[in-house]
Image (cartoon, rainbow, N blue to C red):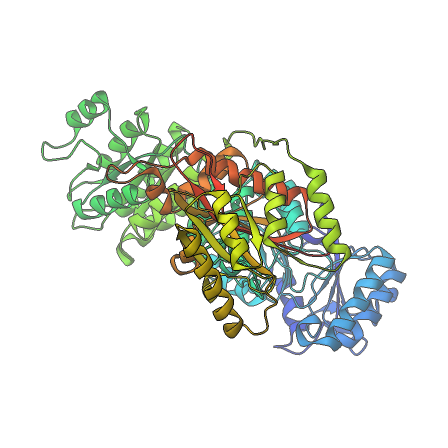
Amino acid sequence: MSLQSFFGPKSVAIVGASRQKGKVGYEILTNLVAGGYPGKIFPINPKADEIEGLKCYPDLASIGETPELVIIIVPAQLVAGVLEECAKVRVKSAIIITAGFKEVGPEGKKLEEEIVRIARRAGIRFIGPNCLGVIAPGHKLNASFGGDLPVPGSIGYISQSGALLAAILDLANANGIGFSSLVSIGNKADIDELDVINAFGEQPETKVIAGYLESITDGDVFVREAEEISNRKPILLMKSGSTAAGAKAASSHTGSLAGGEVAYESAFKRAGVIRCDSIKQQFDFAQAFASQPLPQGPTVAVITNAGGPGIMAADAIEEQGLTFAKLSEETRKKLAAKLPAAANVHNPVDVLGDALADRYEFALDIVLDDPNVQSVVVLLTPQAMTQAKETAEAVVKIVGQKKSGKPVLACFLGAAKVDEGVQILRRGGIPQYDSPESAVTTLKAMVDFVRWRTRPKRVVRLFPVNRRKVESIVERHLRRGLLDIGEAEAKEIIEAYGFATPKGSIATTAEQAGNIAQQLGFPVVLKIWSPDILHKSDVGGVKVGLRSEQEVRDAFDLMMYRIPKKRPDAHILGVLVQEMVRSGKEVIIGMHRDPHFGPLMMFGMGGIMVEVLKDVSFYLAPLTAEEAKQMLLNTKTYHILKGVRGQEGVDIEAIAEGLQRVAQLVTEFPEIKEMDINPFVVGAPGTTPIAVDARISLEKK
Ligand code: ADP
Ligand code: MG
């Protein structure tokens, strides 16, 4: 869907146009006129003959032709009627500015459902309700009450908050930042974020897609389509508000650790969406993505007229994991030949405090030629002799002439003294930053984006498993309405997917426990066996390292005596006598099904400390081998697992494989709502890791 009727309509009707200054119906009309909209404007107001010199109509039907776009500003109760009118005159596109719908409660929600019904029936697509409107500078269309029309540019902006859009517009106008279009989607009752992002994806004038979202309607589809678009255009998003629904009433470790934000984070990562922390950062990024080529790699050269900022940039480069470019011999020779003897011809290139524009011009020209340099930051501080204006001109000139294919970012520090220069940079398409750090952070986002774009194709390995077995366990539980799968059957499920579990059986008497232990061989572990006890250690229901029949019998009696006192409600079936897994590190492999994005895998340091340490990482299933490995790398636990200070490491590949296997299980069984394998005990490379404890809960599909 192109949404072209929203961005470049041939005619616009404003239903609810007003003569009264300060009213939205007046502001929108005057904004449209002030922006120089070249198409026909039809104000609709039965009580007026003309507004601001424009002929007014009592209703849509009396216009005599069909407006391409209708802007609706009438009170909420009247919107449905206006849409019926739209249907009669065959209007296809509308913007509903009016508030008082879903956002105000059940009454409003009903109204909103009604307008959606009418629109669907009539084949009308609409933006809103409860929105600020649409702005398309290239078409001189300001169909909003958000502010003045910005200059045309290549950023397409989408906002779920109208107020924020107004702030962004103001900021952008103050800084001369241009847009291809801005859309306030409001309650997104019909056209949603994905429709707009897709439209931006197709729009030739939009090079960068940016936006602010509070929620994403359809997570799965979002990931798929955003990924496809990111291959062509960068998507920069600010996201706020978490989906508490996901974390509520979680019965697993994974569930309680996975807030809604984690799922968004993973979804954005997979789709190549660049997440921005603030409006400022979003502008920082957007300007560079819109005006500069993408860097070929991580090496950065810095040109400066002062030592301090040069060092700040160097620190930032290191901190962000970029590479401080090592200038070639040839570059250094060329620089030395022209710059004063005191200048530094190594990176950061210091052209000295008395540098005029010519030194910058010369240095930038040479540095851009260096094959070791993949991006350049030009720093300037306004010292006594500094020519901010001329230097800006020189930078614009060199970048334009050379077409080096390398991004050049400027950071002119200061205010009034650099202002003229900054304006020249902006007009010349050189992004300007107010600190070396923000310039470098921007480069880092660009380098990461290039890495994402050149990522290897995702190949998800499919393990041979016993799917039938799991199907029958899951079906049986759902048929009986049992949503928690007990430990025994949870283990059968993971065994069917290739996990090894400790041997053991259930005992109902101390005698029997002793016998089972004897058969297993010592040491053994005793665990309370009850469908009502989720965390066994919490009630003293796990006893490890029992070395004799006597110890086992004693431990049995003690559990049977103490636990019913602590948990009188729990139905205790007996005690599990289990072989003791010897050495190894305990990790957790978990999954929590996010309501928007589906199965979210978790990895972290396991055992009973997981919720205290919270050293965990998440990613959406299914997982490739690289993604599983990356999940490990994203935790501190990884360093412990690899072996610190001479300690032997554990089988990292085995953990990555375990993650992939669980990812396969939860992808193949959407009925699995949450699960943990905790602990998953891994030993030295080559040994078989053991899934000691497992918990699985289901939901009806
Ligand atoms: P829960 O999580 O319900 O408290 P677990 O079965 O995970 O119960 O046991 C708690 C802890 O006891 C584990 O994290 C692990 O450290 C230890 N443990 C349990 N079973 C074994 C076993 N078979 N071998 C070695 N250690 C075990
Ligand atoms: Mg456990």
Work out which residue is located at the far left of the displayed protein and give it: 341
Q: Position of residue 362 (x, y in %)?
A: 25, 31
Q: Nearer the viewer, residue 316 or 416?
A: 316
Tell me the residue at 55%/53% (across/down): 263
In the picture provided, is 443 more to the left or to the right than 461?
A: left
Q: Can the viewer see residue 204 in this picture?
A: no
Q: Classify residue 398 by image quadrant.
A: top left
Q: Nearer the viewer, residue 338 or 53?
A: 338
Picture quarter with the C terminus: bottom right
Q: Position of residue 482 (x, y in %)?
A: 70, 59
In the picture provided, is 244 more to the left or to the right than 289?
A: right
In the picture provided, is 579 more to the left or to the right than 360?
A: right
Q: Is residue 673 above or below residue 645?
A: below
Q: Is residue 237 above or below residue 87?
A: above
Work out which residue is located at the far top of the displayed protein and give it: 330
Q: Position of residue 312 (x, y in %)?
A: 23, 47
Q: Nearer the viewer, residue 476 or 354?
A: 476
Tell me the residue at 53%/71% (across/down): 564
Q: Is residue 668 above or below residue 117?
A: above
Q: Is residue 410 above or below residue 132?
A: above
Q: Classify residue 512 by image quadrant.
A: bottom right
Tell me the residue at 51%/59% (across/down): 510
